[in-house]
């Protein structure tokens, strides 16, 4: 079987999402190996305690020791900017540890698979690098300044072209990687637009079921047929749950409101519900291991106004929160 290795990174605040990603991969691609760069000591402690087969946890300190040039950028960047700076370097680190891998694929920690990623690799037989376009909905044209492609999935074949492109990406991110648009640059993401100029073997994945997200879901009809979520006539491969907010046991998905995207009954019941149930199961498992803000019920305000402030929704109209494109979930129940 082709050796395909995946990598991601997250801190303890994203741990439930990262472990849910792992669960979805083991469900649809059993035996997959997922390298995790632990961006906090707490995340590393929990993953070591969980001892999940197929997860290789690496502390941020060990990673930085192996790449002091990258580590030197930490003092000049915000936490988020530094995390973005790590993406390409992390892929190359994993490749050094997995020299026999044919593909190293970076995945954002908030992805979740609904079928095997094999259908994506079917498109990559002649490719050395794989990227996926945002496919922004028509109402989001102004967001194109953030780049044509999304860093949710970036794949590198272990060949000269694949390695050269990601090495170039690492160099550029160390040089400049900030959370604002500067010409064609934006964080680690804007650089993806230049990949095709570096190699003719860069492939933009065509499968519309890959990286379905709040910013592109308005482009498609979402149905549930034959036990599968269908994106037009294509089965959903993985969804990008960008914008999930938590407050204690509450899960708030307000990204559909932010992007002006529809949130149908099928999307609620057959995309979000499965994911939220997995998040809750992970948190219940983690709770006895280590008490963290992410997995510990937070003190709740006794007033609606106080609760809305605690989850960053005070500026929203109540009608938008309850009946609009945003919705929230408590203890597995979609409201």
Image (cartoon, helix red, strand yellow):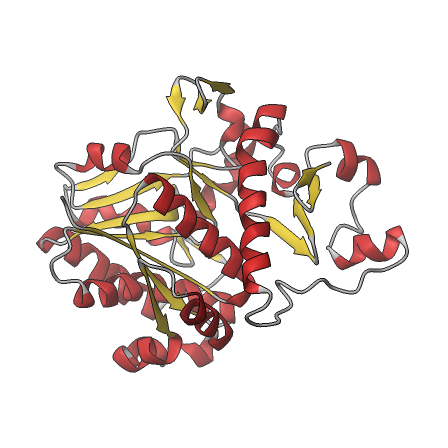
Give the mark count.
0
The correct choice, above or below, for 184 with respect to 9 in the image is above
Residue in the foreground of this view, choosing between 172 and 8 = 8
Whole-percent x and y of residue 117?
30, 38
Residue in the foreground of this view, choosing between 204 and 213 = 213
Residue in the foreground of this view, choosing between 33 and 136 = 33
Q: Residue farthest to the left?
A: 160
Give the residue drawn at x 53%, y 67%: 12
Whole-percent x and y of residue 177?
40, 64
Q: Quadrant of residue 218?
A: top right
Q: Which quadrant is the N terminus positioned in?
A: top left
Q: Quadrant of residue 64?
A: bottom left
Query: Does residue 177 appear in the picture of this structure?
Result: no
Whole-percent x and y of residue 289?
55, 70
Query: Does residue 286 appear in the picture of this structure?
Result: yes
The correct choice, above or below, for 256 with respect to 219 in the image is below
Q: Which quadrant is the C terminus positioned in?
A: top right
The correct choice, above or below, for 122 with respect to 53 in the image is above
Give the residue drawn at x 33%, y 59%: 53
- Is residue 3 left or right of 192 when viewed as pictured? left
Residue in the foreground of this view, choosing between 65 and 46 = 46
Give the residue drawn at x 22%, y 44%: 196
Q: Quadrant of residue 95?
A: bottom left
Give the residue drawn at x 18%, y 50%: 198
């Amino acid at each position: 079987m082709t050796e395909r290795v995946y990598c991601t990174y997250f801190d303890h605040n994203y741990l439930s999402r990262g472990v849910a990603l792992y669960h979805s991969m083991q469900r649809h691609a059993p035996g997959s190996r997922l390298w995790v760069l632990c961006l906090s000591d707490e995340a590393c402690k929990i993953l070591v305690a969980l001892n999940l087969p197929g997860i290789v946890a690496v502390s941020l300190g060990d990673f930085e020791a192996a790449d002091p040039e990258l580590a030197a950028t930490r003092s000049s960047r915000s936490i988020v900017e530094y995390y973005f700076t790590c993406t390409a370097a992390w892929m190359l680190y994993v490749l050094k540890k997995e020299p026999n891998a044919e593909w190293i694929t970076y995945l954002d920690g908030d992805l979740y698979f609904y079928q095997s990623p094999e259908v994506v690799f079917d498109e990559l037989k002649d490719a050395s690098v794989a990227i996926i376009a945002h496919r922004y909905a028509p109402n989001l044209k102004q967001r194109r300044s953030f780049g044509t492609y999304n860093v949710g999935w970036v794949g590198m074949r272990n060949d000269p072209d694949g390695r050269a492109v990601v090495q170039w990406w690492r160099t550029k991110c160390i040089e400049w990687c900030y959370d604002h648009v500067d010409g064609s640059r934006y964080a680690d993401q804007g650089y993806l637009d230049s990949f095709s100029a570096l190699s003719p073997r860069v492939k933009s994945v065509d499968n519309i079921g890959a990286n379905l997200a709040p910013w592109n879901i308005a482009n498609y009809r979402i149905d549930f047929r034959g036990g599968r979520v269908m994106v037009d006539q294509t089965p959903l491969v993985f969804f990008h749950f960008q914008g999930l907010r938590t407050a204690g046991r509450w899960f708030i998905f307000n990204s559909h409101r932010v992007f002006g995207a529809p949130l149908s009954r099928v999307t609620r019941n057959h995309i979000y519900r499965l994911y939220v149930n997995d998040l809750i199961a992970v948190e219940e498992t983690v709770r006895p291991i280590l008490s963290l803000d992410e997995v510990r019920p937070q003190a709740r305000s006794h007033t609606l106004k106080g609760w809305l402030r605690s989850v960053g929704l005070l500026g929203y109209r109540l009608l938008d929160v309850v009946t609009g494109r945003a919705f929230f979930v408590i203890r597995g129940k979609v409201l």
